[in-house]
Image (tube, rainbow, N blue to C red):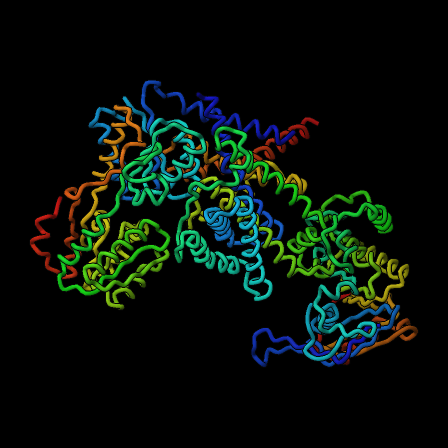
Amino acid sequence: MKMFKKICMSLSLVSLGLFATSCNSNADQIKIGVLQLATHGALDQAYEGFKDALESGGFVDGKQIKITFQNPEGQDSDMSTMAKSLVRDNELVLAIATPAAVAVQTAAKAQNSSAKILFTAVTDPVDAGLVASNEVPGGNITGTNDMNPVVQQIDLVKELIPSIKTLGILYTISEENSKVQAELAQARAEAVGLKVIVATVVDATDISSTTRKLINDGAEVIYIPTDNNLAKNIPSVTNISDELKVVTICGEGNMVTAGGTITLGINYYKLGKLTGEMAIEIIKNGKSPATMPVLSLSDSEYSISINDEAIEKIGIVVPDSIKSRISE
Amino acid sequence: MDLQAIIYVLIDSLAIGLPYSLLALGIFISYRTLDFADLSAEGSFTLGGAVAVSTIVMGVNPLFATILSFISGFLAGMFTGILHTKLKIPKLLSGIITMTGLYSINMVIMGIAKNSPYSNVIYVEDNKTIFDFLNIFEKNYFNIILVSLIIVIIVLFIIYWFFGTEIGMSIRATGMNGNMARAQGINTTVMIISGLAISNALIATGGALFSQAELKADINMGIGALVIGLSSIIIGESVFGKRTFKNWIISVVLGSIAYYLIIAIAIQLGFPHYLKKLLYAVLITIVLAIPLIKKLKNRTKEEKENVSN
Amino acid sequence: MLVIKNVYKEFNLTGNLEDKKIALNNVSLKIKKGDFVTIIGGNGSGKSTLMNIICGVHRPDKGKIILDGDDITNLKEYQRAKYFGRVFQDPKQGTAADMSILENLEIATRRNKKITFKWGFVKKHQTLFVEQLKELNLGLENRLNQKVGVLSGGQRQALTLLMATINKPKLLLLDEHTAALDPKTSKIVLDLTQKIISENNLTTIMITHNMRDAIKYGNRLVMLHNGEILLDVSNEEKQKLKVEDLLNKFDQANESITIPLI
């Protein structure tokens, strides 16, 4: 009997809370849900780009559309609940980063939902089971991938330091995306005649010592893919690498701002915008994700950025061929 | 719209709370029954998921895969128990050692199914999960809840029966008072190892269910498992009581559901995400304060009655 | 029945030679079936260590423990439990606080049996327990399902006593079991102890710090001092003993020893 009372009490609390929040929805607004894996420079920028693209296309949050944004900060169980809720309440859901995309897809499957799903900042959608193929997704999910121009990045290394013989690659062992990029980087590096040493870290605590060992083992330049753990802790690498005059070439721009030396990378804001344009195709022109191929930024949209302080500390001279391609 | 939203919030918390209640029950056995704060939980939860998904991908029947998860957790718990009882390693450290070792082991397990030395994630692609067996509802979503509920109820019966057996009572006595247990002829070493084995077996099964619901297992899925389990236990005890053993274990399950109900409410309330954790803390505190407020109310009522007499 | 042969036990907590403490120095003792031995001694005399070595909590560095012809020196504590009933000094030690009186008693009935997957509550036992609890005269027979934690110290010791004797152990070991109780309760428990021992003809070793009790109860008195047996008197000789005799013996042995208050 007591338990019954308690359950009733909890239910009334719940209803109160929900009543309070559901008072301000407009039936004509197109409801869009967004699930961002965690707060993170690149992911934040993608979201900004997405919103701006929608605005440019005439879809303003609060007017023509209503965006519900959720961020589980990496916690799996929260992400699962958020995905379920977003899929249920929205006709279009944007998932930022692979785990978020998988969670949204799973929720949609379980609910037999007809919601359309877009993803961004996913490195390998086919491997993650999100699409049947990049050209013909086949289901109700499509999006943009942030596959790093790894090949071009390795080529940039050779352009920056023509005399290089040994390349070090550093990534976090628990990140699938990083592993994929590292393998591509190794393949390209060896193809252009470089010796490759690969080193992995488990979390934030072993970055410094692993960096030091990598350099001691002979790495003249260190390649760091778009790795969440390393992106958050770039100084742990650069404090050591800058000191030892070793260039760090990173997977994307935010890592360079944080201290990495140079990158030829994806502009996540632009990637988000591209995704936003796909969203407009879906909500305005009724296109179906099944036939919308997965897009990525074109070659011309890659931007080179450098960190002046790092360049000075390391004491390297940037060739003009590169200088001219540096974008703001 | 409102009523529907409320129902869905409740259902969402069941969808996650039920699989996770196995985690809470497992931690209940080690923490409350054996008085052992077992940190292997994070490793075992992931282990359960890794074993379940890997074997399913390799073609094993999902029910059997879940049983394999159970067994793997059992072994992990045994290991922690042996570290503590035979090697005399302190309880906390024993759990930490197992958890640490399992990190690598889990990655290797997830790699096997992909023909890779290791992997930090593995997806259930087109394979069937344990939730596909009871296709009663059109939406698999409800099947997940139904199957989880059935499994949890079965587990509750088994736990209730087990701790009423001679061995079960001996394990409880060991956790309460090791000296007394030994003086009554109980082999406390075997009891501790068995208790931890069962505890982690349940935790791993919880991981197996969760990973099959999410259609993936990944190396980070166990993060926070111990805190979630403990929170569920304490919320359950405070709100639903622990008068009898039967009452107690049901409270643990309800506590797990309540924990996720709180989270689901917080999500529905649409708080800015960076304030979310603060909201959880506040909501959990309110929930835990309910029994205290009731006690105060009863006490002031009594005092008023005494005065008027 | 119990032969303690040349037992030597030292403790060395810090590892330094000077800190070595010899708890039992080549102690030998033979206990006959039916003996009720009281053991007294000052702090550090070795009496608790002796009991712990008999029970298996500690292993002797040298020497043997032989029970009814079997050498039990190498048996683990829980393996010996089937022979011994024990009551500890701390009332909380002998019972599991969060379990009911019924559950504690059920566990005690299995002290000398193998533990299986059978259901732990035996219906037949209930009448037996109620009967036995009635004999304690503490009203516990009506509270079978109450958690032991709410009982008073004296009640818990009485219950522990019952648990220790319910399966007619070969030896009943009482380790200052009334030391933590107030005088009134202490007497109740001691009377109970005497009653149970006489009714069941139990061989008993009782450690006590109370010299009057040591003289009053039992048929044999052993005094330990600095890990050695100083005095061992039985029957008529024991009955003639007075407290001053014991005090004198203490003084003789060590003039500066602090004697616990009677």
Residue in the picture at 57% in, 65% down: B88
The furthest residue to the right: C236
- Whole-percent x and y of residue A312? 14, 58
- A78 or C240: which is nearer to us? A78
- A315 or A325: which is nearer to us? A325
Task: Please state if B84 lies on the left or on the right of C192 as rendered.
Answer: left
Q: Is residue A64 above or below residue B22?
A: above
- A182 or B260: which is nearer to us? A182
- Whole-percent x and y of residue A162? 13, 61
Q: In which quadrant is the N terminus of chain B drawn?
A: top left
Q: Is residue B49 above or below residue A68?
A: below
Residue in the picture at 66% in, 56% down: B174
Q: Is residue B296 above or below residue C150?
A: above
Residue in the picture at 13% in, 45% down: A327
- Whole-percent x and y of residue A30? 32, 23
Q: Is residue C42 visible?
A: no
Q: In which quadrant is the C terminus of chain B drawn?
A: top right
